[in-house]
């Protein structure tokens, strides 16, 4: 409910579904009631259009006199009907008829018969709006029309709440009738009651003073009532200061600051909190380089709440100075973090304190205390007098918000939705100025108050990078975080904030500047001076080679030529602790078997699970569960330790069917933490190489579920230099559409995403998918969870383009600890009929054979997440099998300088199955029906000081290639990337022009210093050259796909 300082007619245009007029107080005041969110929208609309009008929520939790009351109205009628003595037709004929004039606030009219005051009337009184203004106005009009007697208003209630509305209504009639109230808050009830009686007597109202004074002692007075329970003048309980302060604490728990430690003093207060991502969920979206980092803005929010609680006067905001962020506080899903905030008065002299408080935030990391933030804070007791300057010049460059957040992701700022609240971004092209608006992204629940929510403060800091780079994404070359702020002022503002920033970037990468923000009402919300944002340690900045270039080339190894294992960064801690985890799992199994003695189960998969546990090796005699858990709990293995413990505690109820495994592993994110642990190896380079090799990838993810792999993939399929996305369509699939709703919200920032149900065990074509329509199919730990690997892989193969690639992440562990966790699920045992008896996953060697059976060309690449025997996962790729070409026919064109190279290369190509014909440059016509490989440009630059005769020979050669409609692969030396000699650069420009003029199939291939290795038998360089040749032409002679180099 909320009160608004406007009349009913002025208020009604602002009402929306879910909000109604609850009380018509006076001509200039109403109370509204209804659903929380719509009511807040109405208040915001009223404030926006009428900033001077009072619009305030009431401190009640129930929407009285609204549609919500209809839920209890009938019950209310039933309960009251017995006390109001309703007759069957709703009337009580035994009740005496009163002669008092009665005007109803339900109808606003006079009630002439008290028979109408039955339980239905009072039900309507509960459900309907209070027409106080209408009812009182009609009463005054009736009085003036029917009598000339004096009129006086007496309010009977707990406070004189109606005095103001009555005076406003009487003003409409130009009347000045007297008013008094029986009780007034914070005054003696005896005094106010007698005063009211006196006012009635003064106004010539008949008073029965005998009933008041009882002169004849005839009144029946009850004198033996018990003492009122709220009378605590006499206390019979001893209570020390600590207990009393705990019981009478003034402030509730705050989500960031926590609560004040009651043992601390008023001069040096201390606040303690235990922060977890579950209790402060919006912090999860402040992700920096893969870690959830406690934001600088949150420290400012803590300081503001501390200043509010310590303020002894009117609190309008707070100020900070010399804010220093020492060390980042990293939060995790699996553990909570204890945070202590301590304050002490800043001394002016030995005997005089200032209004400033020294402010320190520290956290406990399990072994020691870490200091994160220091500053000085002070409460502001007056509103800022600063006004927003009307800047006539608009900043000329508009910055697309989505692209800017994509650019931030490339340097490590993986902000979620709650930290993507900048809008209306613009900046100057000549000065380091930027503007933007911070919008609401986190709903205010009223439990943890802020002058300005920390997310909006963070948007303010985000604007510094926009100003320093003039809004150019390619100039954003490193991640900066706030480390020092000289001065901050923050005032109460629950509106959207218009921000303006001035910032520069120093040669060392620091962002320095100032800024201010104003609410949409024009009042100052925040101001900062002396801000410094420092580059993150280890964040290398990439230089912009030509800021004025219209386009730039970005070089990265092609997926077909790179060393696959170099693209995977193993999980080092796994190598150190996995064997200890295996030993703990063996100890746990023995304890589980002991608990299951005499327990029988008729659940098939638990029968299989029991047989599997009996086959596992015994632990070492000196192994201790407590000792192993103590070691592993302090490592990244903790999710497995927690899961072991939960399963062991519930093993018997699960076997009896009393408890669902999902129900015990879902709370506290136990199962989610297991999946996160399995996702620890870094595949960033792999995903970026996949995207760079074909930026228009059409991707399908099988069994995307909650989107863990999707999130990693989409983040890394973003060009690290310019923020562009390296896919054209991303199809998010799962067997259950229930995952799609949350996934659409989670990935709303990514364009070109489709969501479609897919059962990979069945023919995908019959499910509406198009055969051969995907360049990359992603399957992370999903393919093994199917009854038949061959059938599943065959279905996947149907969806792949002939040049496409299947990317798989699959368990393949020699360590069986993960089996104990996953074995409690029925789906773990789906592969029993597929000869996967004890576990559903298989080795990479077995995957290779299954892939061949399903129509693939076997495994293309495989890498483990950790060196054997400490691996858990294998990262693998495979391509569809391509029918072997009938003819590999090519002509190798050479000159006298490259004759020996040509002979050796011809020999090696022939050993690979190619039919090679050697042809000396400019010595007659080329053979028909053969693609051409030219090596004349390898030992010396062909175009350097080219003679007229050589140029004529080149013209004839190229004309003949075009006329024969064959492909040409021109081998040259490296000139565009890691060039050792720029003279070879001429061929790139020449060939680009020739291709445009002749419209022929011509490609260049640049070889680096290792070019001599192309003549070595079965060398990687030779195979790379063959791959390039196949990619370069559309001619069937080299079995080439449609792509070009």
Image (cartoon, helix red, strand yellow):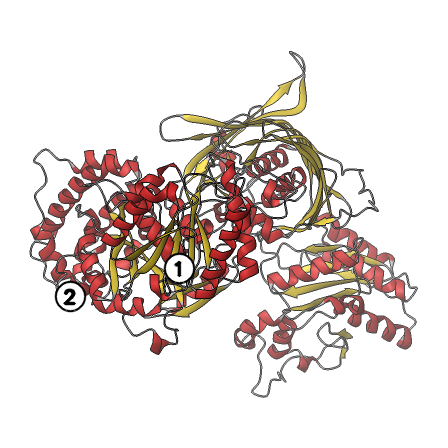
Residue that sits furthest to the bottom in the current view: 89
Q: Nearer the viewer, mark 1 or mark 2?
A: 1
Asked whether, in this view, residue 39 is left or right of residue 575, the answer is right
Q: Where is residue 494 drawn, in percent x and y?
A: 67, 49
Q: Residue at x 31, y 66 (%)?
A: 796
Of residue 734 and residue 894, the one placed in the foreground of this image is 894
The image shows residue 487, relative to residue 189, as above or below, that is above
Asked whether, in this view, residue 385 is left or right of residue 1000, the answer is right
Quarter of the picture containing the C terminus is bottom left
Ranked by sequence position, the earlier of labels 1 and 2 is 2
Q: Residue at x 10, y 33 (%)?
A: 622
Of residue 374 and residue 215, the one placed in the foreground of this image is 374
Q: Where is residue 59 drawn, in percent x and y?
A: 63, 54
Is residue 419 among what the camera can see? no
Of residue 463 and residue 205, the one placed in the foreground of this image is 463
Quarter of the picture containing the N terminus is bottom right
Residue 112: quarter of image: bottom right
Residue 473: quarter of image: top right
Identify the secondary structure beneath mark 1: loop
Identify the secondary structure beneath mark 2: helix
Q: Where is residue 458 drawn, in percent x and y?
A: 60, 42
Is residue 63 among what the camera can see? yes
Label disc, if present, on residue 834 of the rendered structure = 2
**Crowd band around label 2 with a 10 angstrom C-alpha radius: few (<14), some (14–19), many (20+):** few
Label disc, if present, on residue 926 of the rendered structure = 1
Q: Where is residue 486 drawn, in percent x and y?
A: 66, 27
Cα–Cα gap, marks 1 and 2: 56 Å
Residue 490: quarter of image: top right
């Amino acid at each position: 409910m909320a009160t608004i300082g406007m009349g009913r007619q002025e208020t009604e245009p602002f009402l929306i579904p879910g909000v109604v007029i609850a009380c018509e107080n006076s001509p200039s005041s109403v109370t509204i009631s209804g659903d929380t969110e719509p009511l807040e929208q109405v208040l915001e609309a009223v404030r926006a259009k009428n900033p001077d009008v009072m619009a305030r929520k009431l401190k009640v939790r129930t929407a009285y006199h609204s549609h919500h009351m209809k839920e209890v109205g009938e019950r209310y009628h039933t309960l009251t009907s017995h006390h109001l003595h309703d007759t069957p037709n709703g009337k009580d004929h035994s009740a005496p008829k009163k002669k008092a004039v009665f005007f109803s606030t339900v109808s606003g009219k006079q009630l002439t018969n008290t028979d109408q005051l039955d339980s239905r009337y009072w039900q309507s009184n509960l459900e309907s709006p209070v027409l106080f203004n209408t009812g009182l106005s009609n009463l005054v009009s009736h009085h003036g029309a029917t009598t000339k007697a004096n009129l006086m208003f007496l309010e009977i209630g707990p406070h004189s709440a109606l005095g103001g509305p009555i005076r406003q209504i009487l003003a409409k009639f130009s009347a000045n009738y007297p008013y008094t109230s029986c009780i007034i808050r914070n005054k003696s009830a005896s005094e106010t009651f007698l005063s009211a009686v006196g006012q009635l007597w003064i106004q010539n109202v008949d008073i029965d003073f005998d009933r008041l004074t009882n002169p004849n002692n005839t009144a029946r007075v009850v004198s033996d009532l018990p003492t009122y329970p709220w009378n605590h003048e006499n206390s019979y309980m001893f209570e020390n200061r600590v207990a009393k302060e705990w019981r009478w604490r003034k402030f509730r728990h705050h989500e960031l600051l926590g609560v004040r430690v009651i043992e601390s003093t008023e001069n040096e207060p201390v606040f303690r909190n235990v922060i977890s991502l579950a209790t402060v969920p919006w912090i999860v979206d402040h992700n920096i380089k893969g870690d959830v980092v406690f934001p600088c803005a949150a420290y400012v929010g803590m300081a503001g709440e501390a200043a509010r609680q310590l303020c002894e006067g009117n609190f309008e905001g707070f100020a900070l100075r010399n804010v220093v962020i020492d060390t980042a506080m990293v939060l995790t899903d699996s553990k909570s973090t204890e945070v202590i905030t301590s304050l002490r008065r800043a001394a002016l002299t030995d005997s005089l304190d200032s209004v400033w408080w020294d402010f320190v935030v520290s956290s406990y990391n399990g072994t020691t205390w870490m200091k994160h933030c220091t500053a000085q804070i002070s409460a502001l007791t007056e509103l800022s007098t600063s006004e927003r300057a009307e800047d006539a010049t608009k900043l000329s460059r508009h910055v697309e918000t989505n692209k800017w957040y994509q650019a931030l992701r490339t340097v490590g700022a993986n902000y979620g939705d709650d930290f993507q609240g900048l809008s209306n971004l613009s900046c100057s092209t000549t000065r380091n100025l930027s503007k933007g608006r911070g919008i609401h992204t986190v709903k205010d629940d009223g439990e943890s108050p802020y002058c300005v929510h920390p997310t909006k403060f963070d948007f303010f800091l985000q604007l510094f990078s926009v100003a320093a780079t003039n809004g150019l994404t390619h100039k954003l070359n490193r991640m900066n975080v706030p480390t020092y702020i000289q001065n901050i002022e923050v005032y109460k503002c629950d509106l959207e904030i218009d921000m303006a920033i001035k910032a520069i970037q120093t040669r060392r990468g620091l962002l320095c500047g100032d800024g201010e923000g104003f609410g949409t009402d024009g009042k100052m919300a925040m101001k900062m001076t002396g801000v410094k944002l420092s580059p993150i340690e280890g964040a290398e900045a990439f230089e912009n080679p030509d800021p004025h270039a219209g386009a730039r080339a970005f070089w990265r190894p092609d997926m077909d030529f790179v060393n696959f294992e170099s693209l995977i960064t193993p999980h080092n801690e796994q190598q150190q602790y996995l064997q200890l985890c295996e030993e703990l799992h063996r100890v746990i199994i023995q304890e589980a078997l002991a608990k299951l003695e005499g327990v029988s189960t008729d659940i098939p998969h638990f029968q299989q699970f029991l047989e599997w546990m009996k086959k596992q090796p015994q632990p070492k005699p000196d192994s201790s569960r407590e000792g192993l858990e103590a070691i592993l709990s302090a490592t990244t293995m903790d999710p497995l330790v927690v899961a072991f413990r939960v399963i062991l505690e519930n093993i018997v109820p699960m076997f009896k069917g009393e408890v669902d495994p999902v129900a015990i592993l879902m709370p506290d994110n136990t199962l989610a933490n297991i999946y996160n642990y399995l996702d620890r190896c870094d595949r960033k380079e792999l995903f970026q190489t996949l995207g760079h090799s074909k930026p228009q990838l059409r991707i399908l993810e099988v069994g995307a579920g909650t989107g863990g792999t999707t999130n990693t993939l989409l983040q890394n399929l973003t060009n690290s230099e310019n923020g562009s996305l390296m896919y054209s369509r991303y199809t998010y699939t799962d067997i259950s559409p229930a995952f799609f709703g949350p996934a659409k919200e989670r990935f709303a920032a990514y364009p070109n995403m489709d969501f479609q149900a897919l059962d990979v065990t069945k023919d995908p074509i019959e499910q509406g998918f198009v055969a051969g329509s995907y360049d990359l199919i992603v399957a992370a730990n999903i393919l093994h969870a199917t009854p038949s690997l061959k059938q599943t892989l065959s279905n996947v193969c149907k969806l792949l383009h002939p040049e496409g690639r299947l990317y798989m992440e699959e368990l393949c562990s020699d360590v069986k600890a993960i089996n104990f966790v996953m074995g409690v699920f029925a789906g773990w045992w789906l592969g029993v009929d597929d000869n996967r008896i004890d576990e559903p996953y298989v080795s990479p060697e077995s995957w290779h054979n299954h892939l061949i059976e399903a129509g693939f060309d076997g495994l293309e690449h495989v890498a483990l997440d950790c060196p054997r025997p400490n691996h858990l996962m294998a990262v693998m790729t495979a391509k569809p099998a391509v029918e072997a070409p009938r003819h590999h026919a090519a002509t190798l064109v050479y000159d006298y300088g490259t004759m020996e190279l040509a002979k050796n290369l011809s020999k090696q190509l022939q050993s690979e199955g190619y039919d090679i014909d050697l042809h000396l440059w400019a010595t007659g016509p080329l053979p028909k029906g053969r693609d051409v490989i030219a090596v004349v440009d390898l030992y010396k630059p062909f175009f350097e000081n080219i003679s007229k005769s050589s140029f004529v020979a080149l013209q004839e050669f190229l004309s003949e290639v075009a006329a024969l409609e064959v492909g040409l692969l021109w081998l040259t030396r490296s000139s565009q990337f890691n060039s050792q000699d720029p003279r070879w650069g001429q061929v790139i420009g020449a060939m680009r022009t020739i291709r445009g003029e002749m419209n022929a199939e011509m490609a260049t291939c640049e070889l680096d210093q290792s070019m001599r290795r192309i003549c070595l038998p079965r060398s990687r360089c030779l195979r790379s050259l063959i791959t390039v040749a196949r990619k370069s032409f559309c001619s069937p002679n080299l079995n080439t796909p449609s792509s070009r180099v």
